[in-house]
């Protein structure tokens, strides 16, 4: 199945690749940030001697 993207094929492919790269970077950043926040929360809970409900 081949698609004819016409004379703007390079731009269209570059745009899709750019969007995919940005989305992947955002997902990676949010995953890293969530782990960091979870780790900091665990340290604060240990320091206070309280446990959060699960």
Image: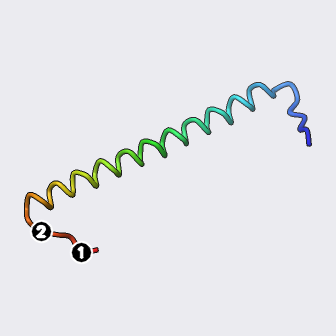
The answer for how far apart the CA atoms under marks 1 and 2 are is 10 Å
Q: Quadrant of residue 44?
A: bottom left
Left or right placement of residue 15 versus residue 49 in this view: right
As drawn, which residue projects farthest toward the left? Answer: 48
Label 1 sits on a secondary structure element that is loop
Left or right placement of residue 53 versus residue 2 in this view: left
Colour style of the rendered protein structure: rainbow
Q: Is residue 47 above or below residue 54?
A: above
Q: Is residue 54 above or below residue 48?
A: below
Q: Which residue is mark 2?
A: 50
Label 2 sits on a secondary structure element that is loop
Q: What numbered label is drawn on residue 17? A: none
Q: Percent position (x, y) of residue 48? A: 7, 62
For the point 12% across and 68% down, the residue is: 50
Q: What numbered label is drawn on residue 53? A: 1
Q: Nearer the viewer, residue 16 or 29?
A: 29
- Label tally: 2
For the point 86% across and 33% down, the residue is: 5
Q: Percent position (x, y) of residue 46? A: 12, 60
């Amino acid at each position: 199945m081949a698609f004819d993207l016409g004379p703007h094929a390079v731009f269209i492919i570059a745009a899709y690749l750019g969007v995919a790269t940005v989305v992947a970077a955002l997902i990676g950043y949010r995953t890293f940030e969530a782990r960091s926040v979870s780790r900091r929360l665990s340290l604060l809970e240990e320091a206070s001697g309280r446990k959060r409900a699960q």
